[in-house]
Image (spheres, rainbow, N blue to C red):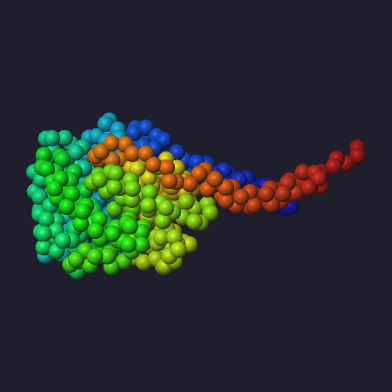
Amino acid sequence: MIRVLRSVVVLFVLMMTSVAGIELSRLHTGSPLERTGAEVAADALPRLAFLREALDGGSARDMQALFPEGWFFSYALYGLTWVDVGAHDPALRERALAEARWALSHVDSADGRAVFDAALDPPYGVFYQGWTTWLRAGVVGLAGPGAPERDRLAADAQALAAAFRRQLDTTGSPFLTAYPGQAWPCDSAVGIAAVRVAGTLTGTDRSALVADWLRAAGARRDPATRLLPHTVDPGTGEPTSGARATSQVIILRFLRDVDPALGARDWAVFRDRFASDVPGLPGVREHPLGVDAPGDVDSGPLFRGLSASASAVALGDAVLYGDRPAAAALTGLAEGAGLAVQWDGTRRHLGGALPVGDAFLAWSLAARPWTGGDLTAATGPSWTWRLPWYAVFTALLAPAWLLALVAAGVPPLGRAKTRGRS
């Protein structure tokens, strides 16, 4: 019996060491900026396989029970990730188009519009119209000039552009409502990006509208951070709350395709004000440094002020702005803390308990700019952010190995077995 117990102890310590080795290696996972387009696409495939399996099993309905846009994001992000995969690897273009169109058919449906108000301007609000038009633009861009979705894209983008123009001309505000009486600048950032990219794809010049939008948005920044605010008054567009990471990471993702230089400037400010101050966790704070406030339905639960959802989306921002240190740190954190498991052609995090979280991460890992050239920034932490992880695993494994050596009878820690005299 004692021999069995000793063997169990040794095997358990070996297992702990193996798990620690896997986790530490994941902290060094290469970011998308260190991979070729084909490698980025290959990394996305098992993630997308899990998401498709989850969607077919009803995960969008489950995610809707957690937050108001759970159903919508589940399909939209799946489709957008496929658009980027098809652009990264032309060999996957036809498959990517088929999957993106499948996602678009769900977004552009009665179920997709169910939680939005048809009476808003534009109909169903800027959140719905902005993201739907963006996904349709992605499909058209991937399919090419003969895409059957091109006419619908032109019409929807024109309706969205007209709504922005009416709002700017009547109130001066660049921010449209997403729900009755509620406006978030991040939703309008998606909308104006969709208008701009759709104009490029359909040959419509909307540069004057984009310039007016940027000017009006610039006049309504959060005075504390000089970033766009989280919420605004739906009538005037004046801030009603300061900048927050949950919305800022979305704004930054889409500013990259509206005004790359402005987006790069805001990314640097964001990293300065919202970067984690927790050793070993190079994620993103929900609130600026010095502001300690709880999480809510937008941010989800916070850990020492850090938002997991904002950190996942910020990874995509780091990729788009060419921030190699930040992209490397956020990729390593996601893979290390996310406890990813891959089997049977699928890859999921945290056991697949939150598929929409996997969708945001897949979207970030496949990120690429849809317009504009390359940008280069360097705001992220150095490799030393991993040192606390090394220290924790060393603190756990050192006594475990001492116990294993004692159990194995290795001298001088254990009593070696001696041979009896013959």
Quadrant where the C terminus lies? top right
Image point (11%, 43%), residue name:
205
Give the residue furthest to the top. Answer: 91
> In the image, residue 204 lies at what x, y percent?
10, 42
Viewer-nearest residue: 342 or 257: 257
Give the residue furthest to the right. Answer: 421
> In the image, residue 338 lies at what x, y percent?
45, 51
Position of 282 compared to 99: left or right? right
Would residue 336 be seen by someone viewing this image from the given angle? yes
Q: Examine the image and state in which quarter residue 114 appears.
A: bottom left
Q: Is residue 126 above or below residue 372?
A: below
Q: Is residue 316 above or below residue 123?
A: above
Viewer-nearest residue: 64 or 316: 316
> In the image, residue 229 lies at what x, y percent?
30, 61
Position of 420 compared to 257: left or right? right
Would residue 133 be seen by someone viewing this image from the given angle? no
Image point (37%, 52%), residue name:
269
Q: Examine the image and state in which quarter residue 164 appears.
A: bottom left
Viewer-nearest residue: 53 or 267: 267
Image point (14%, 58%), residue name:
168
Numbered marks: total: 0
Image point (40%, 62%), residue name:
287
Q: Examine the image and state in which quarter residue 410 appears.
A: top right
